[in-house]
Amino acid sequence: MASIGNDPNGRKRILFFDPDGKRKTIRLGEVSTDAAKSIKQRVEQLVAAQRMGTGWRRDTARWLETTKGTPLYAKLAAVGLVPKPIEQVEAETQAAAEKAIAALPRLGMFLDSYIAGRTDVKPGTKLVYEQARRNLVDYFGVEKPLGTITAGDSDDWRLWLAESEKGEGLGPNTVRKRCAVAKLFFTGALRKRLIAENPFAGLKGTTVKADRERFHFVSREVADKVLAACPDAEWRLIFALSRYGGLRCPSEHLRLTWADVDWERGRIRVRSPKTEHHEGKASRMVPIFPELLPYLEAAWDQTEPGGTNVIARYRDANANLRTHLLRIIERAGVTPWPKLFQNLRSTRQTELAEQFPMHVVCAWIGNTEAVAAEHYLQVTDAHFDAALRRHTKPAQHGAELARTDSRSDWPASGKHRSFSGGCEPKRSTAQVFSSPGGIRTPDQGIMSPLL
């Protein structure tokens, strides 16, 4: 049964218990007593129909038709006596969806939080994360709700990365790498239950093959022009360590100290953050090649007393060596090549592979034979020239075919000259520690020769 309640100022309400025994109220406002009684009767009929699981009486159904679209019908729907209008259901669904989306974390905030929380990765890896973050935010926007990115959106983003006109114009391997990092980001969001599924899960993120169109052999003639355009001895050494030492730039350059330079034995200990997590790969020994020696000596001569780092002036985090090298290359009047530092290492490994066993070359460069074959070794014009010479002059000595540059300093026998011969440093250990200001000793923190 239902009852009528009176409120101040002539307002009335109807009170009833639904089939579950819950007390509910319909506030009618200012209506006459007769109108309230009529509505009370209809409410009782609706409650009875719900309790019995039957349909409405005909007169009740006709009455409801006359109330559709009125505030009274909305009040009956609010207490569950009649279905809500479709428009109301759609509006409530839309409002609920908007509320849920508003509660989702934003893309920019999540990515910043994720990257900051990865204290287990090296600075170089964080730099890769930052690059992928920039691509995601540039495309989707910093305020994009995390859970609204779909698998189709991720496909569009991948295409945008590769587009040269409207997108980033990245190479295939770089696109794969960015996709792999994006997949990593959203796997983290999935594990925190911030999203229901990873929209980037289906993207290929593995570098399968090297992009040989981006390979470039940096000849010694070009290297000489770039070296001549370098602003100082330290920049010449940075370039020489990459081109003639085969070091990874900047990670291996910046870890070099003068204590790592063994002048007497003609070797440099190179510590590599890229491979240090592999057993026995924290460092490697690299010869002080004849082409590298003068630039190493020139940098040593300019080292301040007490200085320990081989590269001292360009250690700031904001010192973008790639940007600097581009300026130097333009100043030298040389056309920039793809993957500036990577191709310097690739060029050096290609040269050395003509003169030494591959396992030796890989030990110096710091990679494996499989990686060298896929990502480093190049076929150069000199190989074709040598093949033509061999075809026309069968008796030509085989060592000439091995040369990739007519100015190679390696002997024709194919074996490296000992450091006590033509490659010997111009100074003894005592001379190494001398300076215009007197003798600098290891106690002054400059260096100590390796034993």
Image: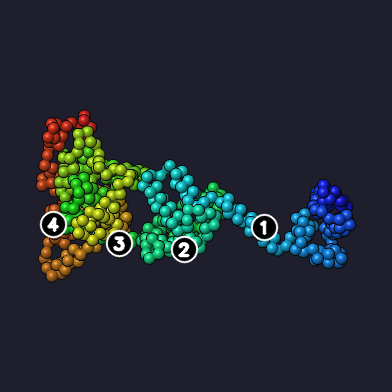
Residue 353: % across, % down: 22, 55
- In the drawing, does residue 40 fall left or right of residue 247? right
Q: What's the colour scheme?
A: rainbow
Q: Amino acid at mark 3?
A: Arg
Q: Please state which of residues 429 and 355 is positioned toward the viewer in this rendering.
A: 429
Task: Residue under label 2, please give it.
Answer: 156
Are the residues tagged 2 and 3 within 8 Å (C-beta)? no
Q: Amino acid at mark 1?
A: Glu
Label 4 to label 3: alpha-carbon separation? 25 Å
Graded by Cα atoms within 10 Å as few (under 14), some (14 to 19) or many (20 or more), the crowding at tag 1 reads few
Q: Secondary structure at mark 2?
A: helix
Whichever of labels 2 and 1 marks the residue nearer the N terminus, that label is 1
Label 2 to label 1: alpha-carbon separation? 32 Å
Q: Is residue 255 above or below residue 88?
A: above
Q: Secondary structure at mark 4?
A: loop
Return the mark for residue 214.
Answer: 3
Are the residues tagged 3 and 1 within 8 Å (C-beta)? no
Residue 397: % across, % down: 12, 61
Graded by Cα atoms within 10 Å as few (under 14), some (14 to 19) or many (20 or more), the crowding at tag 4 reads few
Q: Amino acid at mark 4?
A: Arg
Return the mark for residue 407.
Answer: 4
Are the residues tagged 4 and 3 within 8 Å (C-beta)? no
The residue that appears at 23% across and 61% down in the rendered structure is: 335
Residue 401: % across, % down: 16, 62
Whichever of labels 2 and 4 marks the residue nearer the N terminus, that label is 2
Whichever of labels 2 and 3 marks the residue nearer the N terminus, that label is 2
Q: Quadrant of residue 68?
A: bottom right
Task: Residue under label 1, please give it.
Answer: 92
Please name which of the two marks, 2 or 1, marks the residue nearer to the observer: 1
Are the residues tagged 2 and 1 within 8 Å (C-beta)? no
